[in-house]
């Protein structure tokens, strides 16, 4: 379904509709320039303030890291282990270190250390190291025991700002009265052209926009801009050959399936969701199409050559591949579309407002005000620095 710019459930807002609705026009033209907006679809609700806020929550972490540099030569005697975040552990926790098969039982907590039983249940004690990850399997409560102290994660308020998109339309009385080839109404034609431009700019801003450092709320002398997807992702920013992301083909920074899969795995490990949308420009879309080049086969009667990957299915998500001309050529965006909404400010979805005539012309303004609600930024990722 094409992005219309209207919230799905905005009928009960109680606001009078003082402007001409152009959502039907948007539905006609938006598919030309807004593939990501069309994929995301219309939002379920509107923003109610120029500073749009939402609340994010997360589960209590069940992993931590060892923060200790010296260890006993015999692993079985290393029963006191210093950790990064002691508050994540409780007495009775079963803990597995790193990629080993050992399970440890937490007996006491002292300061920033846990005192454990090594090799619990007959497992073999592993060799520990500074920075090794500790996985908390679960807690074994005592029968008839007292309740532990309650634990919870603090909810976090996030925010983004609305941005006004506007274009002026002016048609002289003579032009409106004259008959032009292929155009029934010059004013309607100009509305449509300006609307296409504003929709193009909205998609571009959703991808690449950024809010100013100072006075982001805007004023009569300071423009208010929104943060786009690219600048909202902080946790999962990947470069081929850095960290867990392998080198690519050719010069080492070209996109291949190993790079894409490794990045999707990192995003999956960071969140409870999965990537369902891969957004790329033309160059990286051609690289994704080449994933199947080596295995492509044709029968003698085939008369159609197909070189296209529109859905990428991996262990870490089934993702639709969306090609947008506004994604930087060295970048691949990995998104969970269920956590993204492009929404209008209440009563400010795209519309046409007539302006007072000051002469022999028809004048008006196509205007809308929108923001992006980008939830759980660690559920998304971006691969950058790719060969172009």
Image: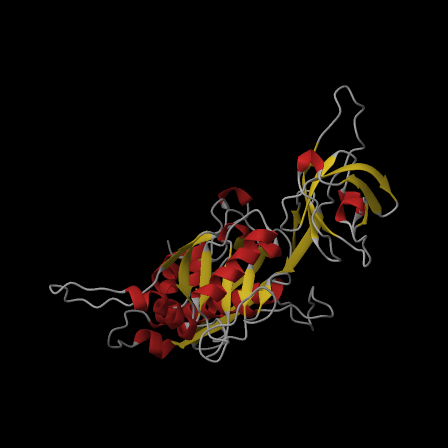
* The one of 277 and 137 positioned closer to us in this rendering: 137
Is residue 343 visible to the viewer in this orientation of the structure? no
Where's residue 174, x and y in %? 35, 79
The residue most toward the front is 74
Where's residue 262, x and y in %? 52, 61
Compared to 301, does 336 lie above or below? above
The residue most toward the right is 111
Q: Give the left or right position of residue 138, taking residue 68 as reference.
A: left
The residue most toward the left is 301
Residue at (54%, 75%) from the top-left corner? 385
Where's residue 58, x and y in %? 66, 45
* The one of 79 and 314 positioned closer to us in this rendering: 79
Is residue 217 visible to the viewer in this orientation of the structure? yes
Please say which color scheme the image uses. Answer: secondary structure
Q: Toward which corner of the image does residue 188 lie, by quadrant?
A: bottom left
Compared to 371, does 143 lie above or below? above
Compared to 49, does 388 lie above or below? below
* The one of 322 and 160 positioned closer to us in this rendering: 322
Residue at (68%, 40%) from the top-left corner? 103
* The one of 247 and 96 positioned closer to us in this rendering: 96
Q: Give the left or right position of residue 112, taking residue 304 as reference.
A: right
Compared to 89, does 375 lie above or below? below
């Amino acid at each position: 379904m094409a992005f219309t710019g209207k919230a799905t459930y905005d009928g009960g807002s109680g606001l009078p509709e003082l402007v001409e609705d152009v959502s039907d026009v948007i539905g006609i033209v938006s598919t030309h320039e807004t593939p990501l907006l069309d994929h995301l679809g219309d939002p379920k609700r509107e923003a109610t303030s120029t500073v749009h806020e939402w609340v994010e929550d997360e589960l209590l972490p069940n992993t931590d890291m060892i923060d200790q540099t010296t260890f006993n030569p015999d692993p079985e005697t290393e029963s006191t282990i210093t950790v990064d975040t002691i508050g994540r552990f409780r007495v009775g926790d079963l803990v597995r270190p790193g990629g080993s098969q050992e399970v440890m039982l937490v007996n006491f907590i002292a300061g920033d250390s846990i005192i454990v039983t090594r090799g619990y249940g007959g497992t073999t004690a592993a060799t520990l190291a500074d920075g090794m990850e500790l996985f908390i399997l679960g807690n074994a409560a005592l029968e008839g025991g007292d309740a532990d102290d309650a634990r919870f994660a603090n909810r976090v308020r996030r925010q983004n700002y609305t941005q006004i998109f506007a274009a002026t339309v002016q048609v002289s009385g003579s032009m409106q009265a004259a008959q032009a080839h292929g155009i029934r109404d010059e004013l309607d034609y100009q509305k449509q052209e300006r609307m296409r431009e504003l929709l193009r700019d909205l998609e571009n801003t959703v991808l690449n926009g950024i809010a100013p450092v100072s006075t982001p709320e805007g004023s009569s002398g300071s423009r208010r801009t929104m943060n786009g997807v690219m600048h909202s992702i902080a946790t999962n920013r990947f470069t081929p050959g850095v960290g867990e992301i392998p080198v690519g083909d050719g010069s080492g920074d070209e996109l291949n399936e190993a790079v894409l899969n490794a990045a999707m795995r990192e995003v999956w490990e960071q969140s409870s969701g999965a990537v369902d949308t891969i957004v790329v420009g033309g160059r990286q879309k051609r690289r994704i199409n080449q994933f199947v080049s080596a295995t492509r086969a044709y029968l003698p009667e085939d008369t159609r050559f197909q070189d296209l990957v529109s859905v990428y299915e991996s262990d870490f998500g089934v993702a639709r591949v969306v090609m947008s001309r506004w994604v930087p050529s060295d970048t691949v965006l990995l998104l969970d579309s269920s956590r993204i909404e492009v929404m209008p400010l209440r009563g400010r979805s795209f519309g046409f407002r007539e302006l007072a005539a000051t002469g022999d012309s028809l004048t008006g303004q196509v205007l809308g005000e929108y923001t992006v609600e980008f939830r759980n930024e660690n559920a998304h990722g971006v691969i950058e620095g790719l060969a172009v």
